[in-house]
Image (cartoon, coloured by chain):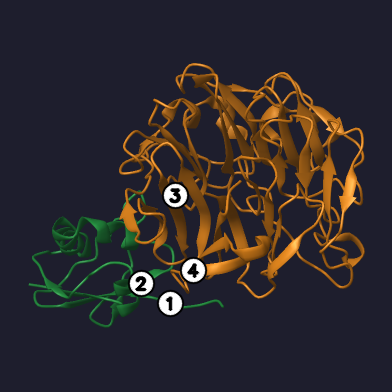
Amino acid sequence: MPRVSFTPNLRRHVDCPTAEVPGRTVREALDAVFAQNPRLRGYVLDDQGALRHHMQVFVGATQLRDRVTLGDEVPAGAEIHVLQALSGG
Amino acid sequence: MSDTLLVASRKGLFTVRQGREQRWRVDRAQFLGDHLSLVGADPRRGSWFGAFEHGHFGPKLVRSRDKGETWQEVGKPAYPEKPADLKDVDPMGREIPWSVKRIWALEPGSEPGDGRLWLGTIPGGLFTSEDDGGSWQMVRSLWDHPGRKQWFGGGADLPGLHSICPDPRDPRHVRVAVSCGGVWVTRDGGASWAASAKGMRAAYMPPEQAHVQEIQDPHLMVACRERPDALWVQHHNGIFRSVDGARTWTEIGQAGPSTFGFAVAVHPRQPDTAWFVPAVKDEARYPKDGRLVVTRTRDGGRNFDVLTRGLPQVDAYDLVFRHGLAIDGSGEVLAFGSTTGSLYVSNDGGNGWQCVSEHLPPIDALRFV
């Protein structure tokens, strides 16, 4: 099963431990996490379910290409990293 | 008179209280490091609200039921699923995202027995809650109104609904204002809406479109609590007043150093009394001659006092955003906070001001509670 981890900066706002969940795509894996942790969804996705503008997702070392439907495939046992870019003052 | 003020800033929420000898001071700092775009309150339930603008993680809403001791995240308003075949663009062809970008207005409904809250957002959606902010429903009648297609962002990239004025005489009668989308009124609790910005003037448009109601840029709209047909608007192109419940608007030509600004406050009992914090007009946006002043009319806009006592009159470049000027329920206590992080309070209707701090983070919004 894929392993999904979240940026520590998110933990200031919502508890989000690393989770092992089923999923053949990034969408399926994240949906499985959000099913257990509904409040987390709105921090990562916008109202239409797309990845928030300044968030990033990597599958292993590969950056997510489909930021709208999150259809990138996830190999069995892959690491999914949900990250952000800190910026501004 | 209120003795407590909530301050939403770029770096946290501050509670400011009046202590001995009528001096106001920062009493509590919470959520340090996080950007709050708005503070709200529902005196019917005693609930306080804070709206966050987490840059990466999106807008969120928290509520306190113990006067700010503790806060809990509550339901976030969310736009409905956008139909796949729908092309929703502003008049310049830019796509309107169906997602909350900022929570920009939060007001209780007018009827004591009506538990409804109203909430406005960028990019323009209006929401209501019947459960103290626990969950939100979009007011589709306004979002789906054909006139909404004419709304656009002014200084911001997207239109935003920032002012909500429920009529205390009738909970079904609500007035809202949008930058840039004019003033809209419902008289049936939100089932139907009509544009209501007749008389406003948009100098940023070609002359033949300057008076189109749906493209006006009211920066903020307020209504007199006890005379709710009296409304004031600080508009991008000046100050406008209505005495007929927003049906028609009259421009106020002169108001001290400038009629440009973002904020306006109206006295809760005296409809002819209103306050503004002026700035050099619109491409510059700083206090004229570096002198920070508040302007006040007490005769419906015919004359203005320029209030300076206690305010810096040399090298002051504070700008006050639209939610950065607040008045309490008595009409005697006012406060304003600036982009420079300065916070001033007046206990006497603006005649004199005391500086609470010149070192807070940039201030977005104030609310007396």
From the viewer's side, name the closer residue of A1 and A86: A86
Amino acid carrying label 3: it is Val
Q: Which residue position is annotated with label 1? A: A85
B322 in relation to B299, above or below: below
What distance separates the C-alpha of mark 3 from that of mark 2? 19 Å
Specify whether B149 is left or right of B342: left
- Mark toward the start of the polypeptide (1 vs 2): 2
* Callout 1–callout 2 Cβ contact below 8 Å: yes
Q: Which mark is residue B28?
A: 4
Q: Seen in the image, is B134 located left or right of residue B322? A: left
Residue B137's x, y, as percent?
Answer: 36, 35
Badge 2 amino acid: Gln
Q: Chain of mark 3?
A: B
Q: Residue at x 63, y 53 (%)?
A: B156
Residue B100 badge: 3
Colour-to-chain, orange: B
Q: Determine if marks 4 and 2 fall on one subunit.
A: no
What is the CA distance from the residue labelled 4 to the residue labelled 1?
A: 30 Å
**Mark closer to the observer (4, 2):** 4
From the rendered image, report the letter of the chain displayed in green: A
